[in-house]
């Protein structure tokens, strides 16, 4: 049993004890457990130096040991699930079922990357043979594949204490790519972070990997976080959190002597257009589904729909009545952290004070237990009030009642970049969706048809990322196997003899990889 | 015949005539042809607005018409090759054979992308089927592929008036991805730029594509260029040129409200390690090959080797003698532009004034005709003089004479990011190269074994890009088919009915694309 000590993990070493903050129970509204010590600058440097030393070893690691390492982390988490559930439910106020689900998602994600690593096609191996007789100049032998970038800094998010945290998607994909990882823990689940961190360290040891493969640092973003991002040895950053936090890291990374990529996922209002035909079809079931989608995780998902765009009229009045009733049934719950709760209450107050906003349904906050709110505005008021483009992180959504399809189009055109965009339609809405989807596609990373955006499936085809400000930029996903490429770069070997080539590129193809050879995919491999 | 008018191409319209600068003949050292007018701010805006309007049309364009468009540009260039050679040789002082070769390379590149577009596998299509029975939550149908980013600004380079210019690699890959392109012409070959620009406009018209598909702007980088990069509608930037120019664009792009990617290729000193065994093996032939590689294009390639790292001793003394003799045979020639010539002469003077530098072989500059120079320094002096890490663009190279393999390793470790890194070795150097290649690999985008880095093969496997400051970052190539991905982002469709899905993603796979379906590549497609 790994006991919680409240200190950073610097490779196989422990940070110094000194005191900083204790874990907080948002339900009981009290602190518990040991004091956590913020990593000191020399501890940050030490973690980075160890990661730098580990980088070439991990880059040269074979597919099998790398895959085994990922499997071992998954097993460690599963074996310790009871203790993880105990700590995480207490620290985040999320129910045990949700944490159990997240353990499944996190271990599934690690195993998906383990399988990807074993299959090896993610390397994107390309081989072009030499032609010494070509005129006017001979053609050289050229081979290339994706290789790891080097040490990666990962910033945990508050809202997924496992799946987007210490052993979450960014860590799994960076390890899969062959990069050492230094996690900056989120202060919303300190004890869970330390426990999961020690499980990763155990896996590093058991796998015989260099100790710099993984470190976990506790401390504030503006000191420990910025020290990490601005250190010359760090080669990429993964971040899930607020827009201000993400942009601060992007700016710090862009101002370095060597700028580095920051993959920041900064939230989204996830617009949903509900066309008249959908309301004719299934008003009540839509209200039930939408209420669930808005309040999933107490509205603390990056994919909760925060904006419902629909035509004003008697049908939408009925729908909002149904939606309001469904939302009113939701039992209030504590938010993830005290500061998220304060920010939500302050943000909601700001919204409700706007002359453009009407409160349709509201559940009051009692003893830190927060219930959902449904706000409404008109299309014209929405277009005139840029504050409504901002995400309000929590169980609330704004219905924008538009004067016809043209105004719906105007509202969609006014939106910033988003993670997702959804349309609900009935059969008679076909002409409208053919206009709306191309506009929405330019704004989002994922389109959802007649469904709900919450719940991001971990699979090969998923894209979780969108045009700025949803993400740092829309070129990368933080969920699904495509995420491995964010921590890689192409590397080319020219004119190399077989004995000096990496296994992946050898003419004999000893790993049996799927490769592009002289412009043709070698599809005839044995299964 | 498209006559040269000296005005920007704003879609199908022409910019206003006003006067700016005339094309320059570096051999005759005189101006010729019409005055070129710099694009005014409203012309830049107009080009961008047209590109913005064209973007959704190009994004929805089928594979076949897009491929045909690229083929048409290639044909236009071929049909006008005599006139292109006439103008380009005059403007750049490059010989006709070289321009002829570049026409072949440029048209070959366009056709390679045309084929890639038809084959369609670059879309990276992924399909994950729904499973409504899955517990605890049903699995949705999720499909994704790469889609174009939107309007792209391309900054032409001076040194490849065709292959890295108006219809060069960035333009070809951006068109292939489905992005409109606005080229900022290089002032070193104004007339060639306009001619090639008009050929692209002809192809746009003939293909029935929207006029905003392509524009060509003349003007300075600090006005026209910055206006382009900071305009909200521009979604990505391709650049080949100096480090200061590239970094200025990177900084401007990072400071935007919506930061955008800048793919800047900023040159490299392309280190070459020559181990003792290689000199024993083939000293004279190495000297011949290296002299050719250093002086190819009068040293104005981004891949000329500017740093030769070798062990001091009698073998290397002989080799430098041989290399000096070969370099002395090279006939001096004019450089691409007057300012490049001035910068080279000033930069070389700065280098030769350094106490750490000795001049081994030097050909004096006469009437603007520049010959090669061989400089030498010691390993210790190199390590103590950071100025020697900078690229000197022109026909010169520095030999660093090291005191044993340990010092060679130190010198390699001290290098910045590079496009290429080369090792020449004999059979007895195997233990050394096994230490050196992993270190060099961390610094470069392409490793070359017993060869020369100049000449970048246009093929699937090529990587032309490297860690900063060789490129903006090492994650992207400007040459080869992988370049298409720099102008794309992944996009996901969830729960869509067949009739609303793009062709690429339909269950019936009407385009016969190679796709990843439920984690397995569909290798059994008919050929």
Image: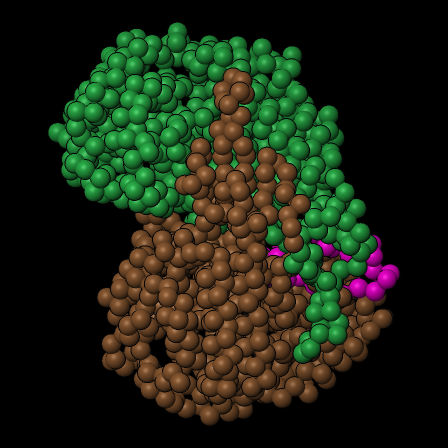
Chain colours: A brown, B green
State yes or no: residue B38 in magenta: no
Extent of the magenta region: A417-445
Q: Is residue A498 above or below residue A458?
A: above
Q: Is residue A391 above or below residue B122?
A: below
Q: In which quarter of the image is residue A391?
A: bottom right
> Which residue: 67% across, 56% down?
B520
> Which residue: 71% across, 83% down?
A326
Q: Is residue A525 above or below residue B315?
A: below
Closer-to-camera residue (A304/A149)? A149
Q: Quadrant of the N terminus of chain A?
A: bottom left
In the picture as drawn, the residue positioned furthest to the front comes out as B428
Left of A492 or right of it: where is A482? right
Q: Where is residue B198 in the image (x, y as percent from the top left)?
A: 62, 21
Q: Where is residue B124 in the image (x, y as percent from the top left)?
A: 63, 49
Q: Position of residue B390 (x, y in %)?
A: 28, 34
Residue A202 visible in the picture: yes
Closer-to-camera residue (A54/B501)? A54
State yes or no: residue A443 in magenta: yes
Residue B58 visible in the picture: no
């Amino acid at each position: 049993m790994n006991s919680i000590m409240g200190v950073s993990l610097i490779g196989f070493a422990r940070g110094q004890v000194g005191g900083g903050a204790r874990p907080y129970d948002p339900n009981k509204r009290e602190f518990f457990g040991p004091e956590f010590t913020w990593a000191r600058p020399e501890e940050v440097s030490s973690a980075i130096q160890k990661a730098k030393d580990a980088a070439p070893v991990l880059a040269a690691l074979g597919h099998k040991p790398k895959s085994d390492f990922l499997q071992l982390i998954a097993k460690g988490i599963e074996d310790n699930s009871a203790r993880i559930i105990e700590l995480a439910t207490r620290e985040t106020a999320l129910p045990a079922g949700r944490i159990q689900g997240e353990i499944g998602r996190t271990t599934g994600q690690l195993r998906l990357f383990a399988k990807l690593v074993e299959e090896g096609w993610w390397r994107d191996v390309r081989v072009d043979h030499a032609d010494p007789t070509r005129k006017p100049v001979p053609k050289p032998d050229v081979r290339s594949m994706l290789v790891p970038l080097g040490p990666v800094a990962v910033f945990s998010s508050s809202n997924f204490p496992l799946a987007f945290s210490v052993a979450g998607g960014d860590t799994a994909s960076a390890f899969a790519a062959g990069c050492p990882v230094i996690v900056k823990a989120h202060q919303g689940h300190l004890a869970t972070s330390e426990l999961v961190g020690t499980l990763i360290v155990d896996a590093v040891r058991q796998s015989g990997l260099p100790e710099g493969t993984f470190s976990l640092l506790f401390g504030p973003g503006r000191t420990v976080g910025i020290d990490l991002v601005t250190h010359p040895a760090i080669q990429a950053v993964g971040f899930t959190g607020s827009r201000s936090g993400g942009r601060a890291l992007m700016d710090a990374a862009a101002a370095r002597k060597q700028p580095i990529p920051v993959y920041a996922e900064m939230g989204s209002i996830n617009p949903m257009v509900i066309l008249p035909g959908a309301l004719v079809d299934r008003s009540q079931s839509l209200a039930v589904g939408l209420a669930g989608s808005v309040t999933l995780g107490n509205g603390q998902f990056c994919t909760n729909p925060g904006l419902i765009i629909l035509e004003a009229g008697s049908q939408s009045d009925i729908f909002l009545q149904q939606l309001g009733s469904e939302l009113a049934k939701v039992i209030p719950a504590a938010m993830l952290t005290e500061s998220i709760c304060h920010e939500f209450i302050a943000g909601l107050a700001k919204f409700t004070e706007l002359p453009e906003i009407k409160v349709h349904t509201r559940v009051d906050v009692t003893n830190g237990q927060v219930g959902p709110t449904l706000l409404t505005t008109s299309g014209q008021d929405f277009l005139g009030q840029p504050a409504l483009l901002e995400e309000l992180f929590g169980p609330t959504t704004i219905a924008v009642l538009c004067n016809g399809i043209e105004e719906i189009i105007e509202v969609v055109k006014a939106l910033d970049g988003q993670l997702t965009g959804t349309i609900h339609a009935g059969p008679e809405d076909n002409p409208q969706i053919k206009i709306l989807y191309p506009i929405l596609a330019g704004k989002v990373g994922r389109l959802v048809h007649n469904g709900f955006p919450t719940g991001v499936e971990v699979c090969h085809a998923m894209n979780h990322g969108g045009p700025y400000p949803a993400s740092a930029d829309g070129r990368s996903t933080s969920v699904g196997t495509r995420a491995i490429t964010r921590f890689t770069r192409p590397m080319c070997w020219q004119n190399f003899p077989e004995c000096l080539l990496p296994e992946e590129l050898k003419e004999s193809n000893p790993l049996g990889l799927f490769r592009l050879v002289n412009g043709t995919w070698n599809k005839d491999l044995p299964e």
